Image (cartoon, rainbow, N blue to C red):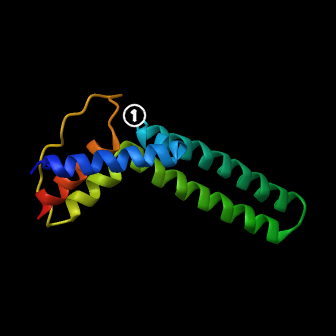
Amino acid sequence: MPLSEHEQQLLDQIEQALYAEDPKFASIYRGSDVRTHYRRRVVRASVGVVAGLGMLLAGVIVPLIPLGVAGFVVMLAAASFGVASWQRMTGHRATAVRERTPSRRSRPREASVQGEKRSVVQRLEDRWQRRQDDR
């Protein structure tokens, strides 16, 4: 069910107000590919794993058990953060959740061109459409 003209105008006004109020925040959501955000998170997680490994080795070399334990915890947290970001980036997590949820019907996703820039309004419309389809 598409949005009415009035609803479309309201969303356009909200989008323009958001861009006028905080252009930096709005530019985050104007990005063309969400996967770049998750790629950055994976890179940060890999740096965290390396830092945790360094802490773990330092704790073993210099006999400081709390440092080694802290390094292991940092490594574990960074690895789980990286795996979750990787799953979201590749879409494995989303498909697994969809398959487990009985209320969702299997439907083909809208074909989108890679690198296509979509406005906040278009993404809100897609989200609204998905919610309506689920009901």
Query: Is 28 on the left or on the right of 51, as rendered?
Result: left
Q: At 11% across and 65% down in the image, what residue appears?
A: 135
Residue 118 in percent (x, y) is at 32, 36
Residue 104 in percent (x, y) is at 15, 61
Residue 17 in percent (x, y) is at 41, 48
Q: At 67% across and 46% down in the image, what residue appears?
A: 47
Mark 1 secondary-structure assignment: loop
Tell which of 87 and 32 is nearer to you: 32
Residue denoted by label 1: 32
Q: Residue 57 occupies which quadrant of the picture? A: bottom right
Q: Is residue 99 visible?
A: yes
Q: Is residue 34 visible?
A: no
Query: Is 73 on the left or on the right of 24, as rendered?
Result: right
Tell which of 6 and 118 is nearer to you: 6
Tell which of 35 and 102 is nearer to you: 35
Query: Is 108 on the left or on the right of 112, as rendered?
Result: left
Q: Is residue 26 above or below residue 101?
A: above
Query: Is 130 on the left or on the right of 87, as rendered?
Result: left
Q: Amino acid at mark 1?
A: Ser
Which residue is situated farthest in the right direction here? 62
Q: Residue 71 occupies which quadrant of the picture? A: bottom right
Q: At 28% across and 56% down in the image, what residue appears?
A: 96
Q: Residue 31 occupies which quadrant of the picture? A: top left
